[in-house]
Image (cartoon, rainbow, N blue to C red):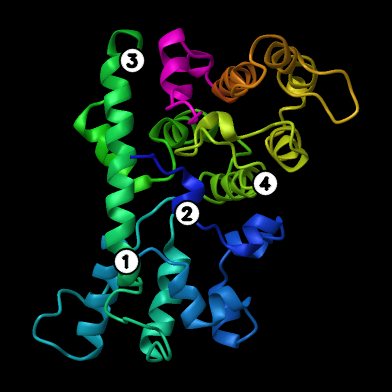
Amino acid sequence: MTLPTIFDICTPRRDVLKGTISESDFAADLAQVLRGDAPEEYLDPVKFFANTHPTRGLKDLLRNVCLRLAGSPDQVAAIFRLDTKYGGGKTHALIALTHVTKGMTGVPNTAEPLDPAILPTTKIRIAAIIESYRQLWEQHRDNLPPVGGRDACLEAFASGYPLHPELIDTLREKMSTLGNFQRVRGMQRLLARSVGRLWEPRPADAYAIHLHHLDPGFEPIRQEIVTRLGQRQFVPAIKSDVAAVDGDQSALAQQLDADHYKGLAPYGSYVGRAILFHTLAFNENLKGATPEELRWSTSSRPAPT
């Protein structure tokens, strides 16, 4: 069986593909929704729930509030405390409640706003991807850190697909320690720009979105690092070692790709990008990666020939 790539399984939103996604997509405003002047993605309940993953926490909140409003004997409390970090979804949950109390007009499958028609095929294909990675990690377990292949890692991969678990771990455990990094919105913005970029060339070896798919040679991503994160000290290293600006001499990683990996995936660039993003951390002990961690980050099935 030919293993499907992420491009066969996933369809990003059009604004992500076109690079037209706006800052308002990452900053919900309850007052705007109540006034009726919010962006359509938040104001229209159909669009809102189409873009909202029904997490267990969100479903529990909606159920409990509705039980309270209905005066049901099954209600659990009159006051609910949304205890999350900044950007953790409190406003998003309140907007969901707003639409629920208005009847969720036009929203299909109001019990769980997710199209069931896509589930069987997607689950089967994703399971094949996860199993392929499990076999790869098992085959090379002596050259990888112990995390690869564990049940918890496989479960995280399955629930977070198409994002590779190492990508999420690096963003949450390393980049999130930088003072200017917005843990949720910054992560969403960086990933949205990376998805839009990745869907242009559609590399044949992309079975999941890895850390090395975050391309600092793409100006919006470069600006995320240099401007939003305030990491200007890395400009010379990025330019000379990882990814040159268009029109400049190729960076070292790009030269290695041209000299040694012609006709193959750009493994030099993959490793260079992974090292760069592993370096973006506040604490010194978090910076960098071991050879085993780099293999874990970049390992994937080769593209079919």
Tell me the distance, in whole angstroms, between the alpha carbons under discs 2 and 4: 14 Å
Q: Tag 2's secondary structure?
A: loop
Residue type at the position of mark 2: Cys
- The quarter of the picture where the N terminus appears is top left
Residue that appears at 37% across and 91% down:
103
Residue that appears at 32% across and 66% down:
58
Q: Which residue is mark 3?
A: 145
Q: Which residue is mark 2?
A: 10
Which one is in front, 230 or 130? 130
Q: Which residues are magenta?
A: 282-305
Tell me the distance, in whole angstroms, between the alpha carbons under discs 1 and 4: 34 Å
Closer mark to the observer between disc 1 and disc 4: 4
Tell me the distance, in whole angstroms, between the alpha carbons under discs 2 and 3: 29 Å
Residue type at the position of mark 1: Leu
Q: Are marks 1 and 3 in contact (CB under 8 Å)?
A: no
Q: Position of residue 141 (x, y in %)?
A: 28, 14
Q: Earlier in the sequence, mark 2 or mark 3?
A: 2
Quadrant of the rendered structure where residue 19 is?
bottom right
Position of 85 relative to 110 (above/below) = above
Position of 269 relative to 292 (above/below) = below
Kindly give the residue lying farthest to the left in the view shown: 73
The question of residue 67 being in magenta is answered with no
Q: Which residue is mark 1?
A: 58
Closer mark to the observer between disc 1 and disc 2: 2
Q: Earlier in the sequence, mark 3 or mark 4?
A: 3
Which one is in front, 159 or 1? 1
